Amino acid sequence: MIRINLLPYRAARTKENIRKQVSVFILSFILLLVLLVVGQGLLSARTSRLSKELDGLKKEVAIYEEKAKQVEEFKKQLDLLDKQIKVVDQLKMKREEPPKLLAKITEMMIAGRMQLTKMKVDDTTVGLDGVAMDNTTIAEFMTRLERCGLFTDVKLASSMQMIQFDVEMKQFQIQCKKPVVKSELEETPAEDGKKSKKKKKKAKSKE
């Protein structure tokens, strides 16, 4: 009977299998390294691109913030200009008020029986000094002032006898109060606070 020794063949086959496994392992390891290097490169490129985009966004934000500051500054300047215009308008009205007021008061005077010698105007009152023939004339003039709608209160401050051109006359002083008209510039902080609270309440109710 012929006997064949298979041990050398089996040993060679085992070595071949081991060699193949080692080759596969090495190739897998190399492939893994390649994938890691490629992945790292792609990640680095993406990170660099995102970093550049972030820097660009930061620059744009800085530009917009600067523009927003300029807009706020323009708004402040416009508000200041509006207030100045309102003040100028008020000063113009106050400058034009005395002549117009005097013209209206002159229309209410009793011709031939009285004469105004002085008029003093401020923000709340008007003072009238003059002479009249008698107390009846003064009373009639005060009645006309009360009915004209220009004043809320007309009072006789003083009245005394005097001689002018050898004629007995009455020297008088009349104080008149003007209606109180609040402008936007005259609003108190408390009123501003109330307005802001009302606005907040309206905003909450809308929500």
Image: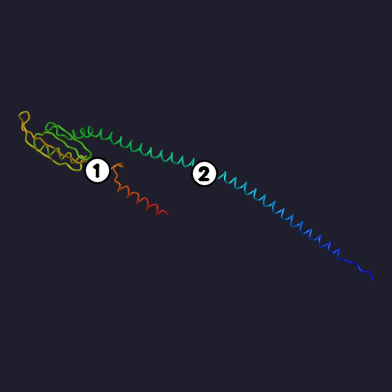
Instruction: Using the rendered view, name the quadrant where residue 51 is placed.
Output: top right
Identify the disc placed on residue 166: none
- Residue type, mark 1 in image: Val
Q: Quadrant of residue 148?
A: top left
Q: Amino acid at mark 2?
A: Lys
Q: Residue furthest right?
A: 1
Q: Residue at x 21, y 37 (%)?
A: 122
- Would you place residue 3 above or below residue 150 in this image? below
Q: Residues within 10 Å of mark 1 (few under 14, many from 20)?
A: few
Eyeballing the image, is 27 above or below 183? Answer: below
In this view, 31 is above or below 91: below
Q: Of callouts 2 and 1, which one flags the residue occurring earlier in the amino acid sequence?
A: 2
**Considering only vertical position in the picture, is 19 above or below 166?**
below
The one of 125 and 200 positioned closer to us in this rendering: 200
Classify residue 133 as left or right of residue 121. Answer: left
Q: Residue at x 16, y 33 (%)?
A: 118
Q: In this rendering, would 121 be left or right of 22?
A: left
Q: Which quadrant is the C terminus positioned in?
A: bottom left
Q: CA distance from mark 2 to mark 1?
A: 54 Å
**SS category of the residue bearing label 2:** helix
Question: Quick one: SS at disc 1?
Answer: loop
Q: Are marks 2 and 1 in contact (CB under 8 Å)?
A: no
Q: Kindly give the residue lying farthest to the top in the view shown.
A: 165
Q: Residue 113, percent across and down?
A: 11, 33
Q: 57 or 204, which lies in front?
A: 57
Which of 169 and 126 lies nearest the eye of the viewer? 126
**Residue nearest the observer in this picture, 102 or 53:** 53
Which residue in the structure is indicated by mark 1?
180
Image coordinates for residue 29, horizontal then vertical, percent: 71, 55
Q: Which residue is mark 2?
A: 58
Check disc 2: other Cα within 10 Å, few if <14, some if 14-19, many if 20+: few
Foreground label between 2 and 1: 2
